[in-house]
Amino acid sequence: MPVAGKVFVVTGAGNGIGKQVALELVAQGATVAAVDINAAGLQRTADSASSRLTTHVLDIADGRAVAAFPREVLDAHGVVDGLFNIAGIAQPVETTLDVTPERIDQLMTVNFRGTVAMTQAFLPHLLARPDGGRIMLTSSLSAIVPVPGAAVYGASKAAVAYFGFGLAQDLRRLSPAVTATTVIPGTIWTDIVRGSAESMGIPVGVAKAFAMSPEKAAKKMIRVTMKGRASSVIGKDAHVYRALGRVSSPLADRVSYLQVGSFAYRTKV
């Protein structure tokens, strides 16, 4: 599917990867409905884009608001050709002993249920498009290798991944012209990653050395989604961990602990 001339919804567009995906889609000739809970962040994105980007304040954890949201996009743009599910929240460094039920509910509601709700809301409209449509779901490196201090976040992102894989199978029957791409990014240098590194005491230079820029990540996410690929791993560290996992899952787990755990758990002592 070509990007130019299409209309895409991008969640999490007020910052980080979502912002860069929205700006890159506009740069490639698309119209974007940029979605975020943060109005100020959306305005900053809009200030960097052309008139082909509209801003929409939405909490993807609000099921009723999400269900009604497609009408707002259709009123603004007439059609919708694709959905980039990028909005999500991180987990503060905390062991399973420390994480509260409220935090668990928040992570699963935003990261998993919010993604599912947005997909369900827009899927009927994408299925009705004569040229088909595209859906992208953002999982995480945490879904393929355990990250110390982020067990529930990893669980929420693993749920997103397996929802995406199952959705892709469903679409084979519902409409092969609509595809779902599950992206598994490694470390992308965003404000969230910078903040996590600082909270764990990881030197910025060390953390950044393993990270991909959000601009480069955005280009890759768009490319694989437009191609209709079922899944894609993005980032040097994600590819390394995936390769290690294929050789030995315990080895991948151990490397993750040695690389991150010594910093993560040191902050809790």
Image (cartoon, grey):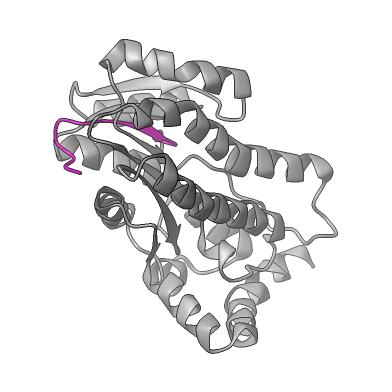
Question: Is residue 138 something that shows in the picture?
Answer: no
Q: Residue 204 magenta-drawn? A: no
Q: Residue at x 40, y 46 (%)?
A: 136
In the displayed structure, would residue 11 be above or below residue 225? above
Name the foreground residue: 171 vs 36.
171
| Residue farthest to the top, as pictured | 75
Q: Residue at x 33, y 53 (%)?
A: 214
x and y percent of residue 245 in the render? Answer: 54, 81
Quadrant that contains the N terminus? top left
Magenta part, dominant SS:
loop
Q: Residue 12 magenta-drawn? A: yes
User: In this image, 202 relative to 4: left or right?
Assistant: right
Name the foreground residue: 203 vs 2.
2
In the displayed structure, would residue 138 be above or below residue 205? above
Name the foreground residue: 91 vs 76.
76
Figure label count: 0
User: In this image, 22 relative to 119: left or right?
Assistant: left
Name the foreground residue: 237 vs 70.
70
In the displayed structure, would residue 50 be above or below residue 78? below
User: In this image, 178 relative to 202: left or right?
Assistant: left
| Residue 209 placement: quadrant | bottom left
x and y percent of residue 100 in the render? Answer: 82, 46
| Residue 173 placement: quadrant | top left
Q: Which residues are magenta?
A: 1-14
